């Protein structure tokens, strides 16, 4: 869900649709965030690519990671798993 302002009147452009192409990064849940947070990412790509990558990990291992999406939103492994089941998820099958 993109919440970046539009260029028209500076209002948010949130349509309620998920933006699978937003930039995202995979991080360890316990990496401490901070000033160098961007340098601590393990993988970068589109939101859909990072979700798909996380879903390739064994279930118990997933819990150690979070997805940081453009717009400063962090998704847990459980949230990512639910989004992976979303009917609009762009699968690479």
Image (cartoon, grey):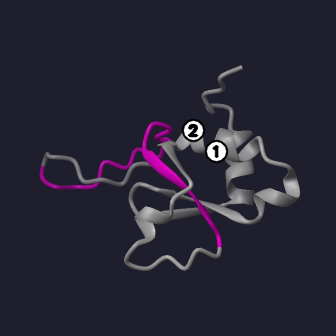
Residue at (87% x, 59% y) in the render: 60
Q: What distance separates the C-alpha of mark 2 from that of mark 1?
A: 5 Å
- Checking the image for residue 51, the label placed there is 1
Quarter of the image that includes the C terminus: top right
Residue 28 locus on image (x, y percent): 63, 66
Residue 17 locus on image (x, y percent): 48, 41
Residue 27 locus on image (x, y percent): 58, 62
Residue at (44% x, 70% y) in the render: 37
Q: Are marks 2 and 1 in contact (CB under 8 Å)?
A: yes
Task: Give the residue at mark 2.
Answer: 48
Residue at (31% x, 48% y) in the render: 13
**Residue 15 highlighted magenta (yes or no):** yes
Mark 2 packing: few (<14 Cα in 10 Å), some, or many (20+)?
many
Horizontal arrangement in the rendering, residue 32 relative to residue 59 (left or right): left
Majority SS type along the magenta span: loop
Horizontal arrangement in the rendering, residue 2 relative to residue 27 (left or right): left
Tag 1, which secondary structure? helix
Q: Which residues are magenta?
A: 9-29
Horizontal arrangement in the rendering, residue 93 relative to residue 15 (left or right): right
- Checking the image for residue 19, the label placed there is none
Tag 2, which secondary structure? helix
**Residue 22 highlighted magenta (yes or no):** yes
Q: Is residue 31 above or below residue 51?
A: below
């Amino acid at each position: 869900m993109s919440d970046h302002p539009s260029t028209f009147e500076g209002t948010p452009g949130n349509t309620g649709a998920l933006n699978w192409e937003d930039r995202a990064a995979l991080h360890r849940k316990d990496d401490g965030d901070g000033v160098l947070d961007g340098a601590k990412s393990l993988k970068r790509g589109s939101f859909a690519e990072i979700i798909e990558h996380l879903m390739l990990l064994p279930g118990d291992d997933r819990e150690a990671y979070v997805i940081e999406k453009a717009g400063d939103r962090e998704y847990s492994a459980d949230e990512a798993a639910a989004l992976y089941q979303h009917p609009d998820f762009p699968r690479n099958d």
